[in-house]
Amino acid sequence: MDWRYNQSASSSRQSYHNQYEQYPLDSDEEEYDEYPLRDRFQGRGQAQYRNEYPSREQEPVHQQEQERQRTNTFPLTQTPPYSSPHNARESPNEPAEPEGKGKAPAKENMASWLSRTASSSQAQFAATALVSGAVVAGAIFGYQHVRRQEMVEDLKSSIPELGRGHEADKLTDFGAAPPRAGMSKEDERSLEFAERAQRGDYDDELILEQLARNRVFLTDEGLAKLRSAFIIVVGCGGVGSHCTAALARSGVSRIRLIDFDQVTLSSLNRHAVATLADVGTPKVSCLKKRLQQITPWVHFDLCNELFSPNAAQRLLGDWDGRKPDYVVDAIDNIDSKVALLEYCYKNNLKVISSMGAGCKSDPTRIFIGDISASTEDPLSRSTRRRLRAVGVASGIPVVYSTEKPGPGKAQLLPLPEEEFQKGSVGDLGVLPDFRVRILPVLGTMPAVFGYAVANHVILNVTGYPSEYIPAKGREKMYDGILAALQGSEEKLVRTNFPGEDAKGIKLPITAADVGYIVEEVYKGKSAISGVSTRLLLVRWRKPEGKIVDLEVPGQKNSLVMTRELVCMTKEEAVVHEREVVRGSKTPEELYDKDIVEGVEARIREEIGFEKYR
């Protein structure tokens, strides 16, 4: 190795460093000891520098070769003394080659761009807008967050804590609000006043003064009976609410209310006490809340549930050991209505039932009578028919209307076709077996029905004398029809079994069954002519197979069924028996097509009703 060459290169670098030390660095550059040539090159002409210090391309080739040989004499792991990590590829006797677009010019261009951008008014305006938008958005979001927190805190603070005189209420089985839900300050004060009155903190003289007119009418003894009575009202809609209001105002002190439904906007045209504030609340709670503001001493027992046969014993049971004095049926669903009336009839509970007030408009045609006498009322007819099927033909007082439908009068509209497209009609109701179509109701008629029911209960409980127009008795007619049917069956046995003594044949049909077929199936009229006098029951078709049971010695039992009988006048029955029952003709050969189809339709309908018998 030629140490003189290294010493010469070192002297050259030192001389160059001393010569160009007078050129200062730019303001945006840093001084690096490892780049003295490049750092000092700033500010001098490139041509001048190359004249004084020629590049490696201008050196002779043999000198470059010698330099590479000298460099290779150092171990691979050892850096030559003249080299550094940044200039290891540079020759020891030449300065670093300046780069026309090196790092220094790049930094200078970036600084110039930033300087120009910062001095631009548009850039300043854009930056200001961005900052202002960010500040405004932050303020809005911050306000919303704070406001949300305040609302949450207000809501939490409005919920009373358990254990401070507050009891957590549960929703009813039908999702209804608890009785005290949505009560105003006035309602709460009325409730507190009623609670004190029911505990005895209410002057009895004030009660008697409020009931003074009833006291004079019913006498002290009658009013005392009424004040101690326990009445159950099932159904708290238009009829039930007016009945309950009348009973409470008249002095009844114990009333149990049973209804699953809630007050709706459409209820306000016929409900006795409901207001807009009560919409959405249970009907039983609405009645109690409003009536306690009128008669605070009355005790109410609320049952916010649907009446059903399974719950009948519990809902119609005793109250503090006392049985109900009267049960009011104000239900408009046929299944629940029949179940309630059947239970009361078979358990000796006094009950009065309200028939349909829908589509009625004549209050002079409203009567109180036995259920067997109610006519021209679809709900009464259906109820009567179902009750007859379970052995209840009479003995239940009802309020009904004899008004007949006619041209121009309201009637139940047919269900729109789009409703049928939604599925089975039975699936469209809120509850199973409940009506789907809206029943036209004049708001005054349920009130008349309700007050008629309440009037009957008050007179019956107090023992006040009353006499209603009696229904026309038809029991003798039923007995006569039954006797004629027995004679017809005897003739049939003698025709099919010559020489057989058919006298005294027994029928599996009673007078009640005769009344059911005549009144409910054929509406008290002949199926052939529509005449309602001199009616009889005969077989519709000629019997096939066995018609009498002779297995028991000395006893002959007819096998005729109610579905096989048709109602006709006496004259029509004679011809029918001769030509069809004992003859060779069929009903299709004897009667018109419309008559045959009408009778067959009623027979099919009766087969459907046999499941209730």
Image (cartoon, rainbow, N blue to C red):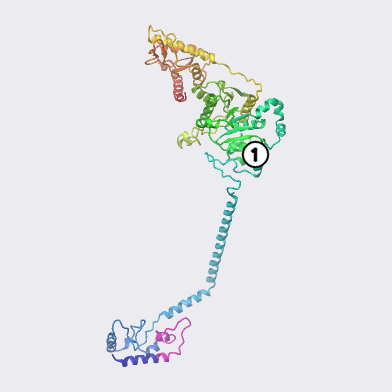
Q: Magenta residues: mostly which secondary structure?
A: loop
Q: Say left or right for 277 vs 558.
A: right
- The residue lying toward the viewer, choosing from 355 and 556, is 556
Q: Position of residue 502 (x, y in %)?
A: 42, 9
In this rendering, position of residue 333 left or right of residue 226 = left
Q: Amino acid at mark 1?
A: Glu
- Given residues 426 and 58, the one toward you in this image is 426
Which residue, given by chain and number where applicable, does mark 1 sit on? 195
Q: Secondary structure at mark 1?
A: helix
Is residue 443 visible in the rendered structure shown here? no
The residue shown at (48%, 11%) is 484
Q: Position of residue 158 (x, y in %)?
A: 60, 50
Q: Quadrant of the N terminus?
A: bottom left
Position of residue 219 in the picture relative to residue 176 (left or right):
right
**In the image, is residue 203 part of the stretch drawn in magenta?**
no
Q: Is residue 72 above or below residue 219?
A: below
| Quarter residue 217 falls in | top right
Q: Which residues lie in the magenta part? A: 16-45
Residue 19 sits inside the magenta stretch: yes
The image quadrant that residue 246 belongs to is top right
Regarding residue 328, the answer to whether it shows in the image is yes
Residue 498 image point, x, y percent: 37, 7
Q: Bin the neighbour count of mark 1 within 10 Å (Cα to Cα): few under 14, some 14-19, many 20 and up.
A: some
Residue 56 in picture, x, y percent from top left: 33, 86
